[in-house]
Amino acid sequence: MRYVIVVVGLIAVAVLAGMWQLSMQSTPANTVYGKAAIGGDFSLTDQHGEAFTQDNLKGHYSLLYFGFTHCPDICPTGLSTITNAMDELGTQADALTPIFVTVDPERDTQEVMAEYVANFHPRLVGLTGTAEQVKTIADAYKVYYSKSEQEGSAMGYTVDHSGYMYLMGKDGEYVAHFPHDISAKDLTAQLKQLIKP
Ligand code: NI
C-alpha cells in the first residue's frame, strides 16, 4: 500500500513538472502578447478609396505598422526601415504587403494617406477610416494611441502611440512583431526566416 502511494505520488510530480515545462514553453521571453491575442476583424479604406478588411490580409504575408502622417520622426523612420527591408528581401518581398494604418483619421484622410505612402515603398498600402473603425483595428492589434495637445505648436496636436510592426501570415493570423526601432538589417533577416514560400 505504501509502495502504491509512493508510485502515485511520483507520477503526480512528473505530470506537474511536465505541465510546468509546457507552460514555460508557451511564453517565450521575447513575445509580448499571446498568439491569438493580436489581430481580428476590421474595416478600413485604402489610399485609393477601396474598402480594405481583414480578408485583404489573406493569401500573402502582411506587415502592419500603426502611426500618423504628422509624426515627426518615429513613423517615418519605421516606414523607411520597412521600405529598406522590402528592397533587401528581393523577390521574397513579393509575398509581403507592407501596410501603414493611421491612428489619426481626423487629419489622415484618404488623400493625405495617398500622398504620404507614395514617399516610401510603391507597394505600401495606407489605411484610414472613421475614428470608430480605427479604434476597432487598434484594439484588435493592442495598439495604444492618444491625442495630446501641444501648446503653441503649428501642428495643433500630436498623437502618442505604440510602435510595433506586426507580421501576419497568409491566413491573416499573427506570426510575429518587431519594435519600431529595429534596424533594416535585422528586420530583413527575421522576415527572410519567417516568410515561407
Ligand atoms: Ni509615430
Image (cartoon, rainbow, N blue to C red):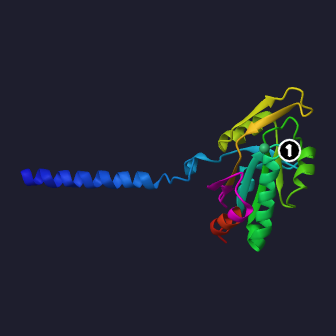
Residue bearing mark 1: 69
Q: Quadrant of ligand 1?
A: top right
Q: Amino acid at mark 1?
A: Thr
Q: Front-most of 134 and 164?
A: 164
Point 79% across, 36% down: residue? 159
> In the figure, residue 161 lies in which quadrant?
top right
Q: Position of residue 71 (x, y in %)?
A: 83, 42
Q: Is residue 27 above or below residue 84?
A: above
Q: Position of residue 103 (x, y in %)?
A: 78, 40
SS for dot 1:
loop
Q: Front-most of 56 and 72?
A: 72
Q: Please check the rendered image and state whether residue 108 is part of the magenta-colored stretch, yes or no.
A: no
Q: Which residues are magenta?
A: 167-186
**Circle 1 crowding by C-alpha within 10 Å: few under 14, some 14–19, many from 20:** many
Q: Please check the rendered image and state whether residue 169 is part of the magenta-colored stretch, yes or no.
A: yes
Point 71% across, 46% down: residue? 163
Point 71% across, 52% down: residue? 181
Judge from the rendering whether residue 54 lies leftward or rightward of residue 124; answer left or right: left
Q: Is residue 86 above or below residue 48?
A: below
